[in-house]
Structures are given as C-alpha cells and as structure tokens.
Amino acid sequence: MSMKIPHRLYLSEDQMPKQWYSLRADMKDKPDPMLNPGTLEPIGEEDLYPVFCEKLAHQEFDDVTRYVDIPEEIQEFYKMYRPSPLIRAFNLEKALGTPAKIYYKFEGNNTSGSHKLNSAIAQAYYAKKQGLKGLTTETGAGQWGTALAEACAFYNIPLTVFMVRVSYDQKPFRKIVMQTFGADIFPSPSDTTNAGRAMLEANPNSSGSLGGAISEAIEKAVTTEGYRYVLGSVLNQVLLHQSIIGLESKIAMEMLDEYPDIIVGCAGGGSNLGGLIAPFMQDKLLGKASPRIIAVEPASCPSLTRGRYAYDFCDTAKITPLAKMYTLGSGFMPSQNHAGGLRYHGMSPILSKLYHDGFMEAVSVEQTKVFEAAAFFAKQETILPAPESAHAIRTAIDEALKCKETGETKTILFGLTGTGYFDMSAYGAYNEGTMTDYIPSDEDLAAGFAALPQV
C-alpha cells in the first residue's frame, strides 16, 4: 500500500500505550542480582525499602512481569506532552546524499527538555501514594533534576537535588528552572553531608561526579524522616518507565509499514537507550527480528567500550549495594571539559548484560565530533539537540554515510532525547574552536579497576 510519508507522525491518545514493557521478562539470562557489600549475598526487595519507595523497589526486583499497567494518573499526565513525535529526517537525508531512511523519536517537547519526565512523574506518583514527606536525588547535566522538580511540584512533594558541581557551575539556568519548581539545589560535593565533606577533604577542588552526588542524595534520604531517594537512570525501574519511548516508536513505525534495521541511542546510565530499544530488543530476544542496536557513549567516559564487566558500587562513597555492570570504577571522575551528561561510571545492569551477551554493539565518540554532528543536524532539521542526544546523531550520520557508500537502503532510528538550550557554553566552545577532546589513558582507567570490589 502506498502512502504519503509524513515529516512528523503523532499517535492519537487512544493509540498511546497503556502498559510499560519490562525487558527482563524476555531475557533468558537475567542480569546478576544486586549484592550486600558486607556479606556479598543477594539482597531482597525489602532491603531497599529504607532507600526507595516500596512500589519502585518491587519494580526493581520483578523479573517476570512482561507488561506493567501504567496508572491512570500517570497516563493523564503523559497526555500533557505525549505522544512524542516520530520524525522522518528528510532534510538530513538529502544533505547527506544517503539512500538510508532516517527517523528520530523526539523527546524534547516538555519543560524539562528531555525524556527524563517519563520516569520522574512515575517515581513522584509512587512517592505520593506512599505518603512520603520528601525525595532526594542527584543530577548531572540537570535534565533529570529538572524533570523530577516538575514532577514533585505537580504532587507537592519537597525535593532536594545534588547537582554535579561542574554542571552546577556551567549550567546556572538549569538550577534556576529547578528552583522555580520549588527544588532545593546543592553543588556536589557539598558540605551538607558526611559523604560530601569527605570528598571535599580528599579533593577541595573536586568537579564532582554522579557517583558522588548519588552518595550525598542517599545519605540525605536515609537520615531524613519520611524521605526516600530516586534515581533517573541505570535502575531496572527507570528502564521500565522509559519503555514508553520505544513502544510509541514501534507503533508509529508499524503505521508507516517500517521497521528499523539500525537503532541508535546515546548511553550514559541507560535510561534513554533502554527505553528506545525495549520493544525492538524484545523482537530480537524472541527471534522475531534482528535489528542492529548501537549504544553510543562519550570517549571521555567509556564504560561499555573500555570498562570492566564486574560488580561495583553504584556510588562513590560505597554505601549502595553492588551491581553487576560495565563500570570504570565508582571513583571515576570524568574530565572537567566533558560538556554534556553521559558521565556515570557504570551502565544499566540490563544493558550491560545484553551487551555482554552480544545482543547490542557499543561505540565511543569524541565530543568535538559529537558537536560537529549536532551543529550539522541543527542546520538541517532546525532542532538544537542536547549534547547527549548528539552522540546518537553522530553515529546515525556515520551509518547513513556507510549506506551512501554501499548503496544500501537501510532504515535508521535514533533517539533525540531533548534540546540543547541549556548547553550554550558548550556550543560556544565548539563554535569558537576552543572545545577539546579528552580520552582517558589505560593508566587513567587502571586506578578505577584496581579499586573494584573483590567478588
């Protein structure tokens, strides 16, 4: 059947998914269990109750439920900015001279400017249902903190955010948005927690890390009555909520009689990538299709491409359970010239397992090449992409150019996680030619590997 291909395809409200999809249900070999760092024994759901909302802890451990009903309140909230559009990049294709068909799922049509709101509203909803007095979290580039501030404001829940210090300094407008929604923001490491004070004592000029900010947020949560901690990436529960991205994408592509040959997503902790690929990876796990799935990470924080698949702490202060994942070591500090997010030392246990078992690929790219792709994309498609998303754009362009060389008409889908309007200093550095690349040496990484727990 022939049809006119639209530039943008939106689902109707009736077509929006009513359930999240859990990849773990279809994984024959599940991710390894989290371990108690003292006993090295697997922990249970109840062990997380002092830290997480009980319902979220249940979602974290549920390996068998394939589809989870999205509560009606969350469905109604989603309708304020979802469904997000699936966009055919006709102008980008033309500029590249490629026979490839390029689609992207754009998650920037909300105030947070990213996909993070998909999980933030779910986590705030469950916190409200449990009657909690407040929440704590960390944020790197600020997208997650912004999204959670919005969600907590919606449910009138106090929020404390520990923002990685280098981003706190580089992105003051992110801080202002969070404060506008009522959140309290601290640069991490801070002098408000024992973990932060210890990090500052060890390095008074520390630029911070997500692992360190996590330590502070967890400490604040467990020492404040009625508070719990929430996380915007990495965890199983977050990938569950973010599956809405991939589910919508698959429905839209089916409407166009399309199926991606290649799926590309940026990879930091795994929330966007895991959400985008979820239903397509299901097809791969069940033998229904075999798309190439490519995770793209920064060369300055290469957990998949150069990390170790090992048990590690999820935070710098080493107070969390141990998770089996690709990691650079919980003490890893990205270079201060690293412009965007994607700065976590480890990768989602789900995605780590899928990568380790050969179901997906991974590449790393230098940030000057990332911003080159971002600027080129913006000029063709009129959206200024977030630096994180631009990693996926870089590799999608590279794959499209390969199609140009071979003459293959492949269908490429990538995730455009959000907009780059809070990243003007980074775009300025690129435009002025002062942006530099940093690639850690093997010696740089060796220190982190040496400190991995002996499991």
Image: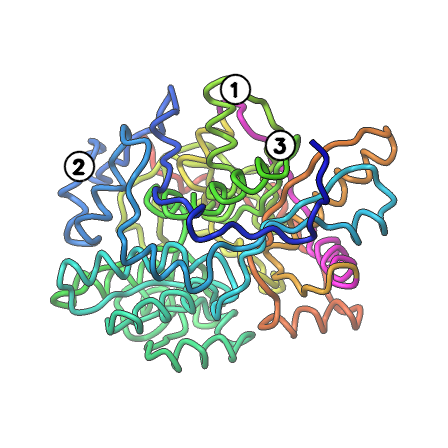
Q: CA distance from mark 3 to mark 1?
A: 12 Å
In the rendered image, the vertical position of residue 176 relative to residue 8, given as above or below: below
Does 135 lie within the magenta span? Answer: no
Image quadrant in which you'd find residue 198: bottom left
Q: CA distance from mark 2 to mark 1?
A: 33 Å
Span highlighted in magenta in the image: 357-379
Q: Nearer the viewer, residue 378 or 358?
A: 378
How many numbered marks have been drawn onto this rendered protein structure?
Answer: 3
Mark 1 residue type: Lys
Q: Position of residue 155 (x, y in %)?
A: 25, 69
Which residue is tagged 1?
Answer: 288
Q: Secondary structure at mark 3?
A: loop
Q: Earlier in the sequence, mark 2 or mark 3?
A: 2
Residue neighbourhood size for the residue with mark 1, other residues' Cα within 10 Å, grouped as few (<14), some (14–19), many (≥20)? few
Does 370 lie within the magenta span? Answer: yes
Residue neighbourhood size for the residue with mark 3, other residues' Cα within 10 Å, grouped as few (<14), some (14–19), many (≥20)? some
Which residue is tagged 2?
Answer: 44
Q: Is residue 429 left or right of residue 224?
A: right
Q: Is residue 418 left or right of residue 92?
A: left
Quarter placement of the N terminus: top right
Colour convention of the picture: rainbow
Q: Position of residue 261 (x, y in %)?
A: 66, 30
Q: Position of residue 11 (x, y in %)?
A: 52, 50
In the rendered image, the vertical position of residue 148 relative to residue 262, given as above or below: below
Which residue is tagged 3?
Answer: 259
Query: Residue at 30% across / 63% down in the picture?
Result: 217
Q: Secondary structure at mark 2?
A: loop
Closer to the observer: label 2 or label 1? 1
